Image: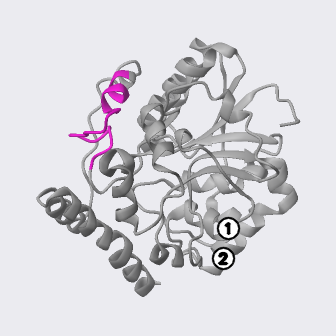
Amino acid sequence: MGDTFTFMDIIYASDNKFAMVLTVSIVSLLKTNADTGDLFIHIIDGGLSEENRKALLALAEEYNSRMEFVRTESLTSYTCVNVSCQNKITHAAYFRLFLPEIMPELTRALYIDCDTLVLEDLHPLWETDMEGCAIGAVCEPWGRQMLRLIGKEGSASYFNSGVLLLDLAAWRQENVQQRFVNYIRSVNGCISFEDQGVINAALDKELYRLPAKYNVMTVYYDMGYEGACTLRHAKNPYSRDEITKALEHPVIVHFTNSFASNRPWLEGSSHPYAGMWDDLRAETGFRDAEYWQDNRSRSRKVNRWIYEHLPKPIGIRYVGFINSVVRPYAERIIK
């Protein structure tokens, strides 16, 4: 990478509902990266309370790091149409699509979802040469039926948007933001797979595949290498060895929504890093906060029960059928 940067600019986005989840991720980031003194955390503020903003600023000051809160216009001011949003994410997540306009001073940034733990130094990721691509991200298995929901066919790669290395100068040069807007308008805001669907539908050659260790998703902890492929009815873009090494030495753990398990802020999480998440939460003002209620739909709870009472290989095939055949078919009917 030819350019040099004064700060490693890390961007999060959150509303007040996800304040606890955001805070725990930032604690993990500070513990593993703040000692270099070049960390600048930018938080796209989707409605954080004054109390939570003050607590986060105090946390950054404790670790000798810079932090700012960035307020935005309404989402429709960027898209000109209302966009769909599931309960598992916040509208604040969509603002990653408009960062060149929201933060015109930045030319490079690392976007991290708040449902993560940062376990190692991020400088090797930050310094990755993306060979002229606008976005670097980790791929995940994604079946043909699911790809068709965003207008892609065949064996196209599908990128997870939870960790994005961003060349914002290239975004501006390639007019990436306008391509996002054009896609959102073309589907009248009814988007499959949220902001992630927009990125994958609108871009192709502008996307650079990062090593899997920079975004290790829950599906691999729940179902393993083969199980993830079976679940998605897809070939894995990474080798078994790459995924094994990522699971053994993750740089960023991403608590993606999983059919088979709860995330650490819900009761009964069996994720291998749930204990670490709780330990980090104990260092924050949320140490006594209650776990979230499980708000999954009745049909999801029923399917989870069926999955848990079947032999695991059969259960994975059952969930794969629901996830990769029934769900895409239902979404096409709704659209």
User: Which is nearer the eye, 46 or 39?
Assistant: 39
Residue 244 location (% of width, % of height): 43, 41
User: How many tags in the picture?
Assistant: 2
Q: Nearer the viewer, residue 110 or 48?
A: 110
Towards the viewer: 91 or 254: 254
Give above or below for 201 relative to 186.
above
Q: Main secondary structure of the magenta part?
A: loop
- The amino acid type found where label 1 is placed reads Thr
Residue positioned 41% across, 43% down in the render: 255
Secondary element at image label 1:
helix
Query: Residue 151 location, x and y as percent?
Result: 59, 79
Q: Is residue 211 left or right of residue 330?
A: right
What residue lies at 50% left-to-right and 56% top-to-bottom?
140
The picture places residue 311, in percent across and down from the top left corner, at 14, 58
Image point (55%, 30%), residue name: 53
Which region is colored magenta? 261-279
Quarter of the figure with residue 188: bottom right
Vertical order, 330 against 64 (above or below): below
Query: Where residue 307 sits: x, y (%)?
Result: 19, 61
| Residue matched to label 1 | 79
Determine whether label 2 and label 1 are within 8 Å by CB.
yes
Q: Residues within 10 Å of mark 2 (few under 14, many from 20)?
A: some
Residue occupied by mark 2? 185
Q: Is residue 273 magenta?
A: yes
> In the rendered structure, does residue 41 fall within the stretch colored magenta?
no
